Image: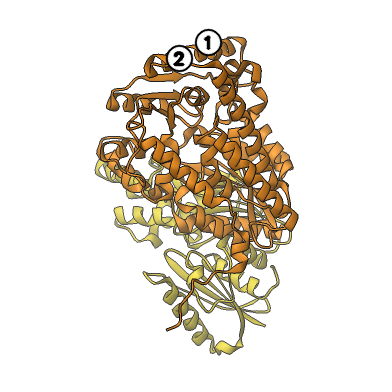
Chain colours: A orange, B yellow
Amino acid sequence: MIDNPKITDPEKEKRKIKCVKKMKEIMTSYYIDAKTAVQNNKKVAWITSGGPVEPLIAMDIIPVYPENHGAMIGAGKMGADLCSKAEDMGYSRDLCSYARADIAASPINGGPIGGLPKPDMLVCSNNICGTVVKWYEIQARYYNVPLFIFDTPFIHSEPSPEALKYVKRQMGEYITFLEEHSGRSLNHDRMKEAGILAIRAQNLWQEILDTAANRPAPMTAFDAFFHLALIVTLRGTSTVVDYYTELLAELKERISLGIGMVPEEKYRLLWDNLPVWYRTRWLSDKLSSHRASLVADTYTSAWCGTTHLYDENNILESMAVAYSSVYLNISIDRMYEIIRGMIFKYGINGMIMHSNRSCKPYSFGQYDLQKMIMKNLKIPVLIIEADMVDERAFSESQTETRIDAFMETLASG
Amino acid sequence: MITAGIDIGSITTKAAILRDGEILGTRVGFTGYNAGSAGTAVYLGLMKELGLDESSVKAIVSTGYGRNSVKFATKAVTEITCHAAGAHLLSPGIKSIIDIGGQDSKAILLGPDGRVRDFAMNDKCAAGTGRFLEVMARALEIDLDEFGEASLKSDTPAVISSICTVFAESEVISLISRGDSRENIIAGIHESVASRVTALARRVNIADPVMMTGGVAKNIGLVTALEKKLNMKLIISEHAQVNGAIGAAQIAAGIVV
């Protein structure tokens, strides 16, 4: 008998990002640490993706992100099942699928990693949406743990002096909350160190995303969706800085070797909103078949869009301002300016907006943005309807027709 | 050169054969549960009717929802591009198209060469589609072919406020039980579809002259309601239902793409 070795396509192998394996190891070890926190006498805080995590890192409290867990549930195609369980519990189908999946996973330890570790406290910032407040209140009652809400007023044009004072004041209250519930006091040197590491990680993340400005793009937004997990979950630690340094070096090498992620890249597209987690492979293949590379997105870049607001010498207060100024907490006019900048930076030919049934603050206003972009920048914009986690809100044939027609129009234009 | 277009929609399958831009014949059949075999059956039926041999066809373009299930097609192209090509062939001055199909309604803006400049499609919901009209016809126990004429006899169109097909159906049933006339209810249904489609048309800034394509173009009541809402005259070709297939055959000839 002749051994039947696994056949690999050398072309495809060449295009794979090598660091990925290490990234998976980091995430595995992070979740092992989190799930064994009790045995190691460590506290766990659940925190929203846009919440100020650096003080947790400085105080050795393990941050756990239900939203990252939601993405894993979506990518693992477990979303529809958990969402319908939440509906059986009485939650509306109109509620965010991250919230539904998380609420339903809690009592049954559902999801791909057998549930998240029980929290000792919850930290919620409404800079990304209003849903998180109610969602975290529900979980605070369910786990019977304290909840801190970092309230960030919406920024229409510029933040008012009162709003700035208000968010800065809350940082102090936040630290008091953490000290009270962890039984430890904050070491300000460690706080500064975590802050500096977070700034470095964000700058590196921006540099990584910017490599896609190169033609052909050495990575796509699909790679960014995957690598995003680190800046979300571990910012403030040296792990992220080390890994992103390595990833950046690999991407620069790909640029020097002319390795693009999409074979014969011809069109460069921009993505808006969260990924359709259970269909990233399908969408990636679909776009590749049209020689289209999704070179940038407004989602993953949200984790490095406010770096300029940080001040190393006044970490806590500057952090408060930065967290208040994130992408989803600003007006459509400011979002448009960011998108416009990206269209020029990455040499964009067309834009795909995911009208995400779950994420109201992200999806609301997309039709206005579409008009502004098409009229002022002459860039075609396609809107597709789906949901980030709940597969029941996705229709393949409808989405396919819209994307195919959009690409045919781009190709003939 | 002889070329063919096969348009497999969610309700009907259409085929068209062209010789150098001249329509030799068209055919319509139901799609049923097997899109691929419906495509083959309608295509071969048309070939037989025209007395043509398969080897005489130089290229075949498939389109519509079942476009990828026609294994013998030279290329699959979306119905948006095909409708544009078809309308441009039938009437070269056309600047916009409104197409109401079984599952999708769309507004397409054309360039002077018949290429698509912009398009908008309905969201995931079935309201404003051919399927919506089918559901309503069933609730009203009237043949869809009589729908258009019936609504023209309406004196006061009923108001259908719901945009959801399922809710609109129950709204229609309560109108029936209230004793509203069938004609007025149908006219109300047409106005509701016309509003949805007009919103799509406005999104792409449709320009005159506008052609309406798709099987629903045969419905005079809806056409009238749409013309009123849009404040534009709609051009309806005798080939409206098979326009996508004609465009596909035209693309196959390499004239447009």
Could you tell me which quadrant the N terminus of chain A lies in? bottom left
**Type of amino acid under label 2:** Ser
Q: In the image, residue B224 lies at what x, y percent? A: 51, 51
Name the secondary structure under disc 2.
loop
Chain bearing mark 1: A
Side of A410 where B180 appears, left or right: left
Q: In the image, residue A11 lies at what x, y percent? A: 62, 66
Q: Which sits earlier in the primary sequence, circle 1 or circle 2?
A: 1
Q: Which mark is residue B58?
A: none
Q: Residue under label 1, please give it.
A: A169
**Type of amino acid under label 1:** Arg
Front disc: 1 or 2: 2
Q: In the image, residue A46 lies at what x, y percent? A: 40, 29
Quadrant of residue B24 within the rendered picture: bottom right
Q: In the image, residue A345 lies at what x, y percent? A: 73, 42
Side of A222 where A396 appears, left or right: left
How far, Cα to Cα, is label 1 from label 2? 18 Å
Residue sitting at x 59%, y 54%: A18
Q: Which mark is residue A185?
A: 2
Residue sitting at x 47%, y 67%: B66
**Residue nearest the observer in this picture, B2 or B124:** B124
Name the secondary structure under disc 1.
helix
| Crowd band around label 1 with a 10 angstrom C-alpha radius: few (<14), some (14–19), many (20+) | some
Q: How many marks?
A: 2
**Residue nearest the observer in this picture, B78 or B152:** B78
